[in-house]
Amino acid sequence: MQLGQFSLQTVSGGRFKTDGGTMFGVVPRALWSRVCPPDDDNMIDQATNCLLVGDGDDWILIDTGYGSRLSESQRRRTSSEDGEPLLVSLEAIGVSPEQIGTVILTHLHYDHVGGALREDESGAVVPVFPGAAHVVQAGELDRATSGRPELRAAYSSDWVTPLADRGLFELVEGDVEWRPGIHLVVTGGHSRFHQAVRLESEGETALYVADLCPTTKHLRSLWCMGYDEEVLVTRRQKVQWLGRAADEGWWVLFDHDPDTAAARLVRDDREEFTVAEAMASL
Ligand SMILES: [Zn+2]
């Protein structure tokens, strides 16, 4: 997709399955299973729709999928892809890791940052994009490396420390226009410093909403993930951002939707949002 001066392409960071209950939090199974039917193990399909943004000079990658360092048991449990799914996707469109100048990370959960590191032939953990600045909220890095016991299931410093040790993080604080037309906005909710990316060019706007609204099945205001740190913040922020997108005709980009990478939305008569126009992939 061309969005003004930006080219946008979906690159898969790998498909996987996750327990349907965890993806819908307090929503009863009888409701979510109607719109998102689980398999016999209660698992549902998930994508990691990373986004490659070209601005004419630089390639900017938003999120990296789960990468190649999952344990065998985790890979099996989540039916995750073997190898380096993100690199396979980039290679398929002729972009090498060395060409990526920037990696924007919406947050530092494994399925977003995992593809930024790999093991080399000697077993050493090395960056996949050694020449790239890895842009993240300072507060998010702080929490990911804090060792706080209550965040132990959400973060592992092993996923981020090798990047920090090499000085590859570029930290931002709060809402910023990071480059002309590329706005980073802190939404909180899913994680305290979770950020979305709003791209604006020549009167067109796309919002990479990330885990504030991971799939089109999460458009309903109260349908949020069990993983959300502050679910009331997610609900509030989601309605606010989806509302702006619907009212102003933005494209909304979904990071975990296996069928819809982007959609334009409309409000229905209950003030909920539905898809007016969808794209499977960009
Ligand atoms: Zn996620």
Image (tube, rainbow, N blue to C red):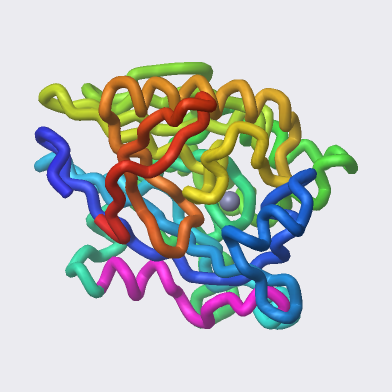
* Residue found 50% across the figure and 39% down from its top: 106
Question: Whole-percent x and y of residue 102?
Answer: 33, 43
Question: Whole-percent x and y of residue 22?
Answer: 74, 55
- The reply, left or right, for residue 191 in relation to residue 214 is right
The image shows residue 120, relative to residue 166, as above or below, that is below
* Residue found 45% across the figure and 56% down from its top: 64
Q: Quadrant of the C terminus?
A: bottom left
Front one among 109 and 40: 40
Residue 172 showing in the rendered view: no
- Identify the magenta region: 77-91
* Residue found 75% across the figure and 35% down from its top: 229
Residue 99 showing in the rendered view: yes
- The reply, left or right, for residue 47 in relation to residue 43 is left
- Single out the residue that lies furthest toward the front: 269
* Residue found 60% across the figure and 32% down from its top: 221
Question: Whole-percent x and y of residue 167?
Answer: 50, 41
